[in-house]
Amino acid sequence: MSTATLDLTAVTAAATAAAKVTAAASDAERAAWLTAVADALDANVTELVAIADSETSLGTVRLTGEVARTSGQLRLFANVITEGSYLEAVIDHADPSAKPPKPDLRRILRPIGPVAVFSASNFPFAFSVAGGDTASALAVGCPVVVKAHSGHLRLSQRTAEIVTEELAKAGAPDGIFALVSGREAGTALVQDPAIKAVGFTGSIPGGRALFDLATSRPEPIPFYGELGSLNPVVITADALAERGQQLAAGLAGSFTQGAGQFCTKPGLVFIPAGSDFASHLAEASKDKPTAAMLTERIAEAYPDGLRNVAEQPGVAVVSGTVEQDSLADGAAPVVFSTSAANVLERPDELLEECFGPTTLLIEYASQDELSAALAKVPGSLTGTVHAQPGEDVSALVEQLSTLAGRVLFDGWPTGVAVNWAQQHGGPYPATTSLFTSVGATAVRRFQRPVAYQDAPESVLHPALHDSNPLGIPRREDGVLTLG
């Protein structure tokens, strides 16, 4: 056994020991832990942003906002657990007169145990060491072991120092949080029997490899992966006629934002055939600056992805150049165009994510052709509709709802609000599960239901006591009560 494996075993053993304490801690105690970490991130924002910018080139404005989003996520989950409905407490009292007699049954969601979290390259704060996966797992009482991303290792280490220190000062148990790094450690972490679930944000190949490891263990575990998304946009003829230039400007800002490295980048845009939208988009995109990409590997892969699209029959370059050195010069925007008929002929080649500031316009000749092409689009995080008031888009919305986890109207998908209603997931390959990774119900990934039959109140969680001492929402004998 290698030294790294021995060290990892010690880390996961400590997490297992901490899980007993975190599961027994009150919601108020865990909320205080989260709030302490949030306050510390805000207090150290200048230092953290400087480190992050030196490693990712994302810029201080973007990164400062991302720290605020990260601390906001921590505070949201503190509110979620103190509100109480996340427990999904249910009580069905005994009914001896029923045929057959019904016992007293009380159900609640419990933490599943230590969780592994893989940091994302494109969100060094919000989907990283102290990001949403970590926050939602800690909120429900699951210790977390984070695998740092190599693209921002110094930031990961410094953030982990702050998180560890603040959790200890707030009274959290030893072992509740740890950071590991390196490909070997990440693989071993997924396979470690102490780990009961994995949260991952990254590429389809990397995520699928880890997913296969997680599900092929002697004890298979849930793998909550966000892997890839094309995020189709549909623009109707009426919308183009009314505000084509405005839509072009909005799309140009969205697909180039963050050098096109957002998981919600609009990568496919369906437009009516014969419009002048392509020229409007070329004009809106031409002055967008080049931008450094997150890692050397990503920068080197971007031109290859562009060439793969450009080489397909029936594809035209609307603006930008395919031949670019994005590693040396930064990534420059490129707009492609093709027809829906061409997509139907070669969906595997054209409906593949190209990570970077590029998008593909797809001209459709009829509603039937649009529907057929959309049916070929892989599962996505978002689907967007741009239509005019009064247009009947109900069939389109229903179709987008089957392939995306969030359907937007007259907006752009790059921007994910963190609140109670948010849904950030979608059919595979957008995600590998049915649960969101953003928003209040993200905690559900790290809980499992337990029912107690005819149990004495002394052994029950307070949420299941008849008096409802926590004052939380719950269902009693089929009736939802607000507490």
Image (cartoon, helix red, strand yellow):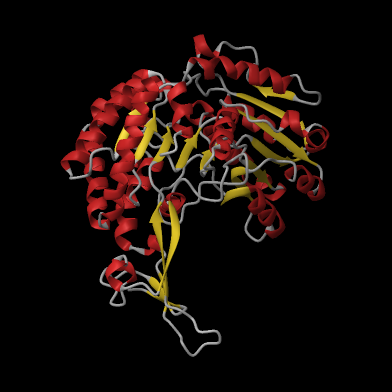
- Percent across and percent down for residue 206 are 56, 28
From what the image shows, is residue 115 above or below residue 464?
A: above
Identity of the residue furthest to the bottom in this view = 97
Q: Residue at the spot x=81%, y=33% of the render?
A: 342
Q: Nearer the viewer, residue 386 or 40?
A: 40
Position of 232 compared to 64: left or right? right
Q: Nearer the viewer, residue 219 or 62?
A: 219
Q: Residue at the spot x=62%, y=37% of the render?
A: 230
Q: Quadrant of the C terminus?
A: bottom left
Position of 51 compared to 328: left or right? left
Q: Which image quadrant for residue 135?
A: top left
- Percent across and percent down for residue 204 are 59, 31
Position of 9 compared to 403: left or right? left
Q: Quadrant of the N terminus?
A: top left
From what the image shows, is residue 470 above or below residue 24?
A: below
From what the image shows, is residue 377 above or below residue 152?
A: below
- Percent across and percent down for residue 110 are 39, 57
Q: Nearer the viewer, residue 192 or 312?
A: 192
